[in-house]
Amino acid sequence: MGTSPYRVVVVGLGKRGKHHAATFHANPRFELVGVCDIDSERLEAARTEYGVEASSDAQALTQAVKPDVFCFCTLPNVRLPLINIGIESGAKLIAYEKPIAVSTKEAKDIMALVRAAGVKTVVSHQHRYGQHYQKVKEIIASGDLGRVHTVYGHSTGWMMHMMTHMIDYMRWYNGNADAEWVMGQAAGKGKFADIHGSPDYMAGIIQFANGVRGYVETGAGAPDVPEVDYWWRKCRIGAQGTEGFAEVLTGGGWRAVTKKGVFSGEGCMDYDLDMPPYVDEMADWLDDDSKVHPCCGEEAFKGFEIAMGICRSVVDRGQVQLPLADGAPEMEALEQILPETPVLCTTAETAEEYLG
Ligand SMILES: NC(=O)c1ccc[n+]([C@@H]2O[C@H](COP(=O)([O-])OP(=O)(O)OC[C@H]3O[C@@H](n4cnc5c(N)ncnc54)[C@H](O)[C@@H]3O)[C@@H](O)[C@H]2O)c1
């Protein structure tokens, strides 16, 4: 461990920024030294709670307090400008939220900047810290499923919210294999109006370089997970092998049939449990370059590229090879070509409808 705690600034104090600020503040390996939001009420609340420097101007704040960790938790429309501010601040690590960008071009620009500056990046695909997610990983790694041939993930939440979560955990369950090609289809234009602008439903096939096939679905046409009542946690991610399967339900534990028998267990996505180890492993990576964070930006970029490749397949048709060549912004291209026809739902289309 370093001799003094790593100094942290958190920008964007909404739902996720509050989780990050509280978790960094509670960990003695970090010192929260600044908070920032353009919303004055949120900013004042954080200033009062933590008694640290507070500003609505991320650039001025970071130049004043010189953080080691620049964390920002803004909505997906604000990424590149804050990456630049993070780099200019001299921070050694930038922690930020999924999705990493809104297009392949923006994601590539971000990666080029942070690579050139030698800045580490970590992206919040932190559901993997759940004990039920970890249990499924442990079973897959044990070999008890035989030869894994398929990984899958689906969520009722729509693409720009959920697809990189699904792909990140599918890739983790598949040894972080690279993808060779992807193919996809999409339906419904309602969610393009959302700040996480996406087709209502998106389905993708992924061919991984290690021979494993992946299936991913997000949004209104994705299968229901009736065992889970909280709409955003209706996600199922797993792996099938020659001798069984193991899968996690984000809000409903895990289950497996392996060559050793039939098993199941508890677990539910919980920020209070997932955030502390997620943040702690940032300090491990800062202490020791060889302890690369499991949610590092390079892996997040690969997952994002898969999601964007699926979008391109809808627009261009056919199989799309990875790594992706440069191309037009994916969401705009999709919005232009998708028909107005509403998506055929397998469950309620929104959390509100489901709960109502
Ligand atoms: N990893 C997860 O489990 C998880 C869960 C929910 C949301 N998210 C992601 O987290 C991100 C943020 O979501 P949220 O629900 O916290 O959003 P939010 O709207 O609650 O908070 C965003 C905050 O950023 C502030 N902001 C915007 N631009 C700013 C700027 N230039 N400088 C300073 N502050 C600025 C806003 O005023 C707002 O307070 C999204 O990308 C979302 O997809 C991740």
Image: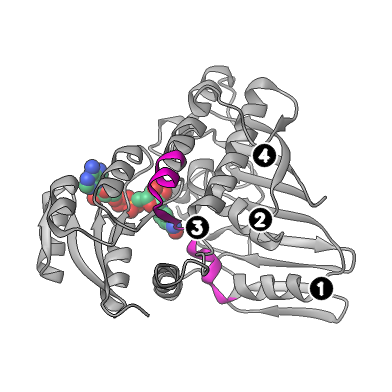
State the extent of the magenta-drawn residues as a range. Answer: 112-131
- Is disc 2 in contact with disc 4, using a CB cutoff of under 8 Å? no
Secondary element under disc 4, as helix, strand or loop, is strand
Report the side of 246 relative to 261 (left or right).
left
Q: Real-space Cα distance between discs 3 and 4?
A: 25 Å
- Given residues 147 and 192, the one toward you in this image is 147
Secondary element under disc 3, as helix, strand or loop, is loop
Mark 3 or 4: in front is: 3
Count of all numbered marks drawn on residues in the image: 4
Label placed on residue 92: none
Seen at 25% across and 58% down, the residue is 10
Q: Which residue is mark 4?
A: 203
Q: Amino acid at mark 4?
A: Ala
Q: Real-space Cα distance between discs 2 and 4?
A: 16 Å
Seen at 69% across and 75% down, the residue is 138
Q: Which residue is mark 1?
A: 143
Dot placed on the residue nearer the N-terminal end, 2 or 3: 2
Density class for disc 2 (Cα within 10 Å; few <14, some 14-19, many ≥20) is many
Q: Is residue 8 above or below residue 265?
A: above
Q: Real-space Cα distance between discs 2 and 1?
A: 17 Å
Density class for disc 3 (Cα within 10 Å; few <14, some 14-19, many ≥20) is some
Whether 114 is among the magenta residues is yes
Density class for disc 1 (Cα within 10 Å; few <14, some 14-19, many ≥20) is some
- Is disc 3 in contact with disc 1, using a CB cutoff of under 8 Å? no
Label placed on residue 171: 2
Residue 195 rendering spot, x and y as whole percentages: 38, 37
Seen at 46% across and 42% down, the residue is 111
Dot placed on the residue nearer the N-terminal end, 3 or 1: 1
